[in-house]
Image (cartoon, rainbow, N blue to C red):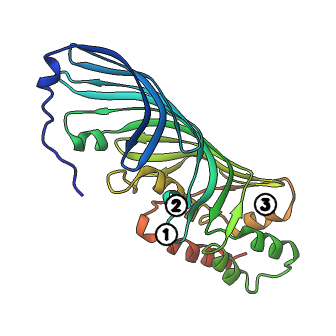
Amino acid sequence: PFLDKSKINYDFYKTFDLNGNFKIASLTYKNEDFRNAALNGVLKDGVLTLGNFAADYNGGQVSGNAELGMVDVPYLKGELNLQGQKMAEKSWSGSVYGIKSGILSAQAAFHTGAASEEEMLTGLGADISYTVETPVVKGWNLSVVDADLKKRDRSDGLAALVQENLQKGETAFARAAGKVKIVNAQYTFENAVFEAPGWTVSSGRKVARPAFSLRSRAMPALAAASFSATMFCSAPPNAVSMATSRPGSTLKIDDTGPMMPRRRRADAARMTVLTEFW
């Protein structure tokens, strides 16, 4: 659905001031349940400040603060912290790729214009850092590729094996981490890494995703489902072999080019072409 471009009328909220502390045993928003929520709210001179928000949520805790400036140039800014969040496949996976499970912790600082609903999203900027403990990545069956490469002495059949196992199965990692920078609803992954005992899959540099837009889909779903689908795509096959065949080695991905949501399945085919030169 398209967001409303019409200007939000804040005039009513400029007619009074408010100061209060709130505690709510159960707060439900769009089927999301927050328990033991508490925050303090201050509305003064057209600026609404929500501070010291804290609640139990999704198996962990969420906290943060926000400020909505209902002034000549409306704005919204704030900080959000997530700790110990249970990641469910239905929220973090597409039909082929995504995160099946894991424990997410993240910190985010955000800012955007607030003149309209559309501006709130299209003008969004944020700096996010995250870690995921024991993530299970859907759509990568790396153990099969790893076992094959350790005993392989020729490339016959490697292309088919890689393509097949980058489109099904799952891989359990010990940890994932990285940063995301958002500018005008376009995001860039920085230093994303998946770690498992003995080897690491990582982005060796900043990985830009200018073709993706937060305007069309939810950010978490894109981050999980789309990024994990293409992490191997531009890696030379000899790099894959070197990383997965030697304990303690690291595979760094030099990923280039846009990543479109509707082309998730095409990436395994790109990997197939590359393996012909292995």
On residue 264, the disc is 1
Q: Residue at x 37, y 50 (%)?
A: 214
Q: What residue type is labelled 3?
A: Ala
User: Which residue is the site of mark 2?
Assistant: 225
- Quarter of the figure with the C terminus: bottom right
Residue mark closest to the camera, 3 vs 2: 2
User: Farthest bottom residue?
Assistant: 156
Viewer-closest of 202 and 121: 121
Mark 3 and mark 1 lie on one chain; the one further toward the N terminus is: 3
CA gap between label 3 and label 2 equals: 23 Å
- Residue name at image x 70 percent, y 81 percent: 161
Q: Is residue 17 left or right of residue 227?
A: left
> Disc 1 to disc 2, how far (Cα)?
9 Å
Any part of residue 256 in sight: no
How many angstroms separate mark 3 from mark 1 (CA)?
Answer: 24 Å
| Closer to the eye: label 1 or 2 | 2
Q: Residues within 10 Å of mark 1 (few under 14, many from 20)?
A: some
Q: Where is residue 16 in the image (x, y as percent from the top left)?
A: 17, 15
Per the image, the residue denoted by label 3 is 243
User: In what element is the residue under mark 2?
Assistant: helix
Residue 215 visible in rendering = yes
The 10 Å Cα crowd at callout 3, few under 14, some 14 to 19, many 20 or more, is: many
In this picture, is 178 found above or below 50? below
Asked whether disc 1 touches disc 2, contact meaning CB atoms under 8 Å apart, the reply is yes
Residue 208 on image: x %, y %: 49, 50
| Residue at 52% from the left image edge and 61% from the top image edge | 225
Q: Name the spot of residue 85 as percent of width and height, x first.
A: 58, 44
* Callout 2 amino acid: Ala
Label 1's element? Answer: loop
How dense is the environment of label 2, judged by Cα within 10 Å: few (below 14), some, or many (20 and up)? many
Image quadrant occupied by the N terminus? bottom left
